[in-house]
Image (cartoon, helix red, strand yellow):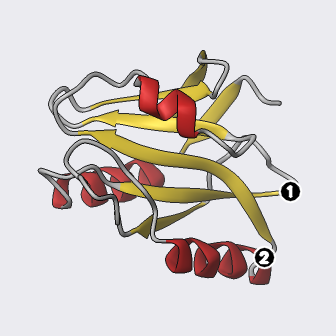
């Protein structure tokens, strides 16, 4: 698994537009990569947060997630990362984040107050580099 995530400017802008729009709730979405460039995030799929308490946690709408994964496959892309925001917390995994991690991809966490974006392998809680382009 990669220890660096390459995040082009347009992907950064898409993430920040989404998570700031969803305030005061947590925003959530998925990012896609091409198999020939598995470290470079190339497409952003914002998803609705359907958690019972969306200001404190996230749960991606399952139907929207399925549609995003199908759209990736149709475009020759793969799931490359999952992102979500912490509206009032740091860009570090919470205990809930660690417990709910299911996909073997980097998890990007956006700190909405500090405008900071960090990436982790979960549930191992290993921080990895985010290379901003």
- Residue sticking out furthest to the front: 52
For the point 34% across and 66% down, which residue is it? 50
Instruction: Find numbered disc 1 in the image and state the secondary structure of the residue it sits on.
Output: loop
Q: Residues within 10 Å of mark 2 (few under 14, many from 20)?
A: some
Specify whether 124 is left or right of 37: left
Q: Nearer the viewer, residue 51 or 21?
A: 51
Instruction: Return the mark for residue 73.
Output: 2
Dot 1 or dot 2: first in sequence order is 1
Q: Is residue 28 above or below residue 98?
A: below
Tag in front: 1 or 2 = 2
- Residue 63 visible in the shown view: yes
Residue 85 spot, x, y in % from top left: 32, 42
Q: Is residue 77 above or below residue 14?
A: below
Q: Is residue 13 above or below residue 49?
A: above
Specify whether 126 is left or right of 91: right
Residue 22 spot, x, y in % from top left: 20, 59
For the point 35% across and 25% down, which residue is it? 91
CA gap, disc 1 and disc 2:
11 Å
Quadrant for residue 116, please give it.
top left
Circle 1 residue = 35
For the point 32% across and 54% down, which residue is it? 27
């Amino acid at each position: 698994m990669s220890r660096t995530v390459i995040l082009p400017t347009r992907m950064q802008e898409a993430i920040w537009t989404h998570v700031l729009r969803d305030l005061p709730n947590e925003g959530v979405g998925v990012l896609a990569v091409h198999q020939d460039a598995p470290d470079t995030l190339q497409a952003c799929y914002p998803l609705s947060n359907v958690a019972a308490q969306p200001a404190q946690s996230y749960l991606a709408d399952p139907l929207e997630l399925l549609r995003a994964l199908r759209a990736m496959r149709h475009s020759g892309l793969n799931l490359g990362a999952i992102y979500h925001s912490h509206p009032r917390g740091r860009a570090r995994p919470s205990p809930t984040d660690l417990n709910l991690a299911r996909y073997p991809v980097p998890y990007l966490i956006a700190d909405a107050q500090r405008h900071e974006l960090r990436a982790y392998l979960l549930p191992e809680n290993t921080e990895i580099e985010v290379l901003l382009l």
